[in-house]
Amino acid sequence: MGGMSEQLDAIVIGGGVVGAASAYFLAEGGARVLLLERGEIASGASYGNAGWISPSHGTPLAAPGVIRQALRWLLDPESPFYVKPRLDLELVRWLFGFARAATAARALETMRLNRDLTLASQALTEKLAASPGVEFGFSSRGLVVVCESQAGLDSAGHELALLRDLGGDGRALTAADVRVLEPAVSEAIVGGVFFPADAHLQPERLVRCLVDQARARGARIATGHELLAIEREGRRVVRLVTTRGDFTAPEIVLAGGAWSPRIAAPLGLRIPVQSAKGYSVTVRCPPEFGGTPLLLSEAKVAVTPMGERLRFAGTLELAGLDLSVNLRRVRAILRAVDRFLPGLRREPALETWRGLRPLTPDDRPIIGRSRALENLVVATGHGMSGISQGVITGKLVAELVTGARPSLDLAPFSPDRFGS
């Protein structure tokens, strides 16, 4: 790698789906781009997630009733949403911002904005999947929300009503309807909702595909480059110091996922992102599985077929930059699968994974330039929607870097919307 002597137009920090898509679209537009990744490509949150592109099932985490539910879950370390108690001023500020965002009006607006992003990203992803020689398991089979209680069914029905108000659609299902789509479900299931517009894919293969496509267009990909320092002069980022040399470019893209706040802090830029740890367990796909992705509603567990494998993913744990594996939370996912899908022969685990998703207090991503730094584009905070929104985010980043008019209005995603 050429280091400081290399002539570059842009440097992208982060080798997850957002960074890979940014490098791809920049390189496609003719930019000389370098992608820096501290580990390996797709080694973080973009590796072991549920792989959904879900324009339909999009109620934001910050929504009415969530605070009350979260307080009940707070004392349960196996709950779907768990905040690890700790003295952390940024966490307290984030939680206050989360509470402010959890109103009906703001939640509906966030649902609309995230749906628009996801629809745009889905179209780009489908186009990429149709390219010659490209394969990342893209499939448009929809999504079934499976409910074991009337409260869960009422919640799914409410989400369906909101979706219809936004121009989408779905179909309410009886318990018998659910069994037609997935015969392995429990006799206790009371019904569900089918969202036909949703898709799924194999996330790590998507990210590697984007990197391969970027490299084929001239992008440089530098893995194993840990960022040690990021230096600023005035309103410009002037130097990136890594474990394998120093780099500079006229434009910098910060797509560091959950590590973005730590990277931005030396620049005097506050990015209110908390690390939302999620887990998944991947097994061989039993032949009796129906083949349509499922959301086990009350447990908040996703079930996604990925070729010859089946992935169970879930839980949200705010525990800081902590990558330890809490086996109690892993077992809670598997117990939920056994409860909802007793007719599914559960194979031994092929892989148990955890990753840190970057979550903003209003559950909208951060995409744009801050007024404080004229040559930095921030692209992070996608929470559980990185695969759903990552490809369009890369295109928007490339448009910002090159000075083109963004394809979508980015004001609602501005890094300055949280104040100083």
Image: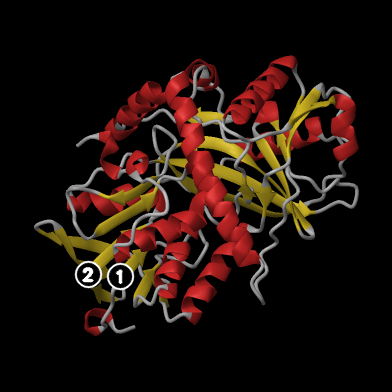
| 312 to the left or right of 247 | right
Residue 103 is situated, as x and y percent measured from the top left of the image, at 44, 19
Q: In what element is the residue under mark 2?
A: loop
Residue 364 at x, y percent in the picture: 43, 39
Check contact, mark 1 vs mark 2: CB within 8 A: yes
Quarter placement of the C terminus: top left
Residue 373, position as x, y percentages in the image: 18, 54
Residue type at numbered disc 2: Pro
134, 30: nearer the viewer: 30
Residue under the image location 76 percent in, 56 percent down: 309
Determine which residue is flagged by label 1. 10
Name the residue tied to disc 2. Answer: 250
**Residue 182 visible, this angle:** no
The 10 Å Cα crowd at callout 2, few under 14, some 14 to 19, many 20 or more, is some
Q: Choose the circle earlier in sequence order: 1 or 2.
A: 1
The N terminus: image quadrant: bottom left
In the rendered image, the vertical position of residue 95 relative to residue 212, given as above or below: above
Amino acid at pointer 1: Ala
Name the side, left or right, on which 293 lies relative to 181: left
State the residue at coordinates (31%, 63%): 401
Numbered circles on residues, count: 2
Residue displayed at 71% across by 33% down: 170
Front residue of 115/246: it is: 115
Separation of marks 1 and 2 at Cα, in angstroms: 6 Å
- The secondary element bearing badge 1 is classed as strand
The residue sitting at 47% across, 78% down in the picture is: 215
As rendered, which of 79 and 386 lies closer to the eye? 386
Q: How far from the left and from the top, in percent, is residue 328?
A: 62, 35
Q: How many neighbours does mark 1 have within 10 angstroms: few (below 14), some (14-19), or many (20 or more)?
A: many
- From the viewer's perspective, tell me whether residue 214 is left or right of residue 235: right
Name the image quarter holding residue 125: bottom right
